[in-house]
Amino acid sequence: MKYLLLNRKNRMIRAAIGSLLSVTMGATSVSALADTTVEQSEEAPAKGAIKALTKYDVNETKFLKNNGIVIGGWANGGVTYNATNPTDRFNGPVTFADRASEFQLNQLNLFVQRAVATEGDKFDFGGRFDFMFGTDSVFTQAYGVPAYDVNTLQPLNRSNWDLHMLRGQNRFYDIALPQAYVEAYIPVGNGLNVKAGHFYTPIGYETVPAPDNFFYSHAYTMQYGEPFTHTGILGNYTVNGNVSVMGGITTGSATGGWDGGWNKQLGNWGGIAGATWTSTDKNTSANISGTYGETSEHSSQSWGLYSIVLKHNITDKTHLVLQHDHGYANNVALSTVRDAQWYGINTHLTYDVKDNLAVGLRGEWFRDQDGFRVCSPGRVAATTNNEDGVAVSTAASGNFLSTCQPATYYAVTAGANWKPVPWLNVRPNVRYDWNDGRNPDGSNYNVFDGASRQSQFLFSTDATVTF
């Protein structure tokens, strides 16, 4: 698939892709990756991908232009080679690019959005809806109500907003509806932006949409240490040219306000808040954000997280990001009932070789102190459900469940971003992971190569087309 997308000279392929896109989207548009947070970056608008193939741009129609509505999306897919050649073909606890020697259509994401004003003296209203198909979908569904209550282990009715919409149809491909919200600009003070519904978290640095990330794979901090989405109400306010704040309430979750849906655990309310400082020259910024709430309707135990993200442009071409996260959940039922903690540090260093080529390095240390957050394989843990009182997983076809033990995880990733045309980004990556966990009997806790090794090398390449 990756090679088909890159072979622009093949007229038959172009015609086929053009026909498909004109049916599913009928459009080209900017890659408006929206608004996940004042801290997370947005991909620059990429025009022309569909227009070059279909000669038609639905966003130029009178109705959409007059109403400020944009239709667009992206397609992302790649292949990962695992040097250990695992027999189960899972890359251990690595998520997203988690299958070895197997092409993954990670994200086919389509969206409709009306962005609201960010300043002025008039009210403005809009919203956004995202539809995602692919192997990444399971990681961004509203799975915040687990199969069992983390404090009491009682079976829970999981959210059915978008969880397992294709359950039973495929082990790895599913559908997610990661964003569905309305939004308003309220002209008070310097302007208040409010959204209500289901939306990506504003916490942390890395995010789910493929065009917003430098690397194909993700840090453990993002994979296991932070929420992906929330359901609730979120407000953003710019205090002055240097400081902005955000805050709101979350619901629909039995994991402290993380990844909540619409129709379960609506009696469990939590909070989310953060602040960002940006230097006057825009070369340095600091963000702190976090969540806090009771775990579920069935438990008043606390579940919280904070994340600190520091950014600095060392030079015009050299960019540094430092991140530290710390989360906790009280009185969770593990081998014993105890408070659980997870925390870590990661760094991103990127260099712009030229306008369409950048190279980068990411390093991470992540401590899952109580074996509560990181489970291997990650996809099996995410898709475990409760059917007739038996925990099963579509990813594992019911053959096995994921394993979790206290451990510290280390990862180093090197990669590049190459954009031969504005709407195409190719990201080759090499990654080395290892851990130092121990089983209760003192033996090594092996999470790689089908639970037989403590380390692995991954080599991957993916491509993202925005339209």
Image (cartoon, helix red, strand yellow):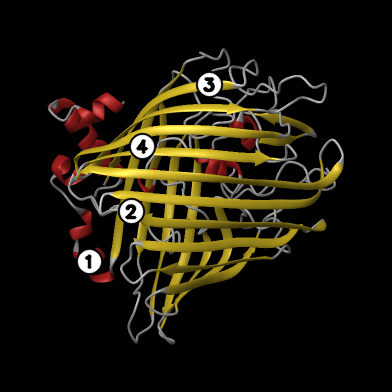
Helix, strand or loop under label 2: loop
The label on residue 65 is: 1
The amino acid sitting under disc 3 is Gln
Of residue 69 and residue 327, the one placed in the foreground of this image is 327
The mark closer to the camera, 3 or 2, is: 2
Q: Residue at x 73, y 64 (%)?
A: 267
First reached walking from the N terminus: tag 4 or tag 1 = 1
The amino acid sitting under disc 2 is Ile
The label on residue 456 is: 3
Quadrant (top left/top right/bottom left/bottom right) for the N terminus: top left
The amino acid sitting under disc 4 is Asn
Q: Label 2, on which residue? A: 314
Q: Position of residue 379 (x, y in %)?
A: 59, 32
Of residue 122 and residue 332, the one placed in the foreground of this image is 332
Helix, strand or loop under label 4: strand
The mark closer to the camera, 2 or 4, is: 2
Q: Label 4, on which residue? A: 76
Helix, strand or loop under label 3: strand
First reached walking from the N terminus: tag 2 or tag 1 = 1
Q: Residue at x 48, y 58 (%)?
A: 180
- How crowded pointer 2 is (Cα within 10 Å; few <14, some 14-19, many 20+) is rated as few
Q: Position of residue 365 (x, y in %)?
A: 57, 39
Q: Quadrant of residue 141?
A: top right
